[in-house]
Image (cartoon, helix red, strand yellow):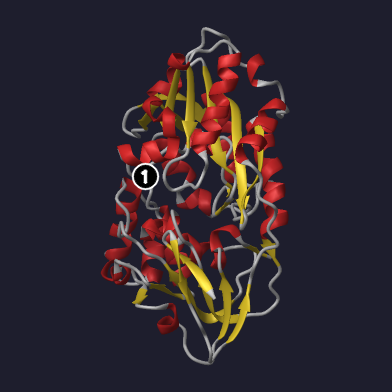
Amino acid sequence: MDLPLGSDTVAVDFPDCAVTVATPAGGDAVDVREAAGAAVSNPHGPPLSARVDPGDAVAIVVTDVTRATPDDVLLDVLLEQLQQAGVAREQVSVILGLGLHRPMTDAEIEDALGEHADLAANHDSDVTVEAGTVDGCAIELNETVAAADTVLATGMVEPHQYAGFSGGAKTVVIGAGGESQIRYSHGPEMLGRDGVRLGRIEDNPFREFVDEAGDIVGLDFSLNVTHGPAGIMDASAGDPRAVVADLAGTARDALSVQVTEEYDAVVAGVGAPKDANLYQATRAATYVALGANNPLRAGGRMVVPAKLPEGAGEGTGEQRFYEWLSEADSAAALYDEMAQGYEPGAQRAFVVARVLREHDVWVTNSDSAEIVEDCLMYAANTVEDAVEPGSDVLVVPDALNTLLV
């Protein structure tokens, strides 16, 4: 079988193993422009034309290179709607929602936004203004977004370790926010709460915090999509909470796979853009092991083929992730230490340590084997090298978009 690796695939074969493949039912791909146009024409709540005035300065927060969102198309649809409402292109600023990820290059911005790349600027989490508080936490916001009369956002509603599903207000609150809310929302106290779980938005404290912060920052309108194995499956627009609920329902139906057995190894596919660095690629291991139904036996191993051209990752969060893992003596000691607190961005090390206390994680086929082994994980040249003969193996070809239930 073929598994994703970077922008290509790698062939794998387990002749000495019992192999089960977890493939979601998926859904039919849609034409993104048609779906986005239909969504903004029939939004949740008032239409965009009723939420913006012709003289408004408008900020649109879009996703960054870590999300496979068709932002060029979504941005084009939003700009057409704004023009029809009397808002000129010159009144619009586009902010790349980096959070604590690295800045996007000019080439990446042009590739992501096409003819609208000239409107875009990278978010800088060090240059923010306070917009209010939620749960006693200061909500810091990108200066351009804070100064705008109307705030819009794109987004990808896909399974997320903490928010249940991404998208909605998260694009602005985290993507265009400061360290204050990232530290609070991604800290050990929040991540340890009941309900903070992959695939869950109802009664999820993380999602509730993000949604309340979205009210504070004045997010007026979201245009989001969701995707499955075949591509983009649907679009939804309007009130951010309703948009996420709408597309999360579509995603659950398309991405859920029932698993009733336990396995010696799970091979979890990632592919581009998430396997660009170790920070993002480890989502495959944590999504499987910390999801609703961990299919691994006690002592079972996780195997993740990932290219890792950027090593651990180049952003502030990625470097904090690497520092914590590379300086640790053991997963158990690291978890206990991080449970006392850590810097924003380091939370991925915390959840990886949680998995590593119970399971070995092998990363194969990478350009950064030394970095993998620095981080309490094992490196192997091929997937087959990481799976012991005679194992019961579960293959999850698209681990970030499969919900094991």
Q: How far across and how far down the image is residue 279, in percent?
A: 39, 57
Q: Which residue is nearer to you in this view: 123 or 55? A: 55
Q: Residue at x 57, y 18 (%)?
A: 82
Q: Residue at x 36, y 45 (%)?
A: 101
Q: Is residue 166 above or below residue 355?
A: above
Question: Does any portion of residue 179 appear in the rendered image?
Answer: no
Residue 230 is left or right of residue 217, and the answer is: right
Question: Does any portion of residue 378 appear in the rendered image?
Answer: yes
Badge 1 crowding class, 10 Å Cα cut-off, few under 14, some 14 to 19, many 20 or more, is many
Q: Which residue is nearer to you in this view: 372 or 14? A: 14
Residue 356 is left or right of residue 16, and the answer is: left
Q: Which residue is nearer to you in this view: 404 or 330? A: 404
Q: How far across and how far down the image is residue 159, in percent?
A: 59, 53
Q: Residue at x 44, y 78 (%)?
A: 383
Q: Which residue is nearer to you in this view: 1 or 365? A: 1
Q: Which residue is under mark 1?
A: 101
Which element carries disc 1, helix, strand or loop? loop
Q: How far across and how far down the image is residue 146, in percent?
A: 44, 21
Q: Is residue 231 above or below residue 284?
A: above
Q: Is residue 202 above or below residue 293?
A: above
Q: Residue at x 42, y 53 (%)?
A: 347
Q: Specify the quadrant of the image occupied by residue 384.
A: bottom left
Q: Residue furthest top?
A: 55
Say how many tags the image has.
Answer: 1
Quarter of the image containing the N terminus?
A: bottom right
Q: Specify the quadrant of the image occupied by residue 371.
A: bottom left
Q: Amino acid at mark 1?
A: His
Q: How far across and how far down the image is residue 23, in percent?
A: 64, 67
Quarter of the image containing the C terminus?
A: bottom right
Q: Is residue 394 above or below residue 237?
A: below
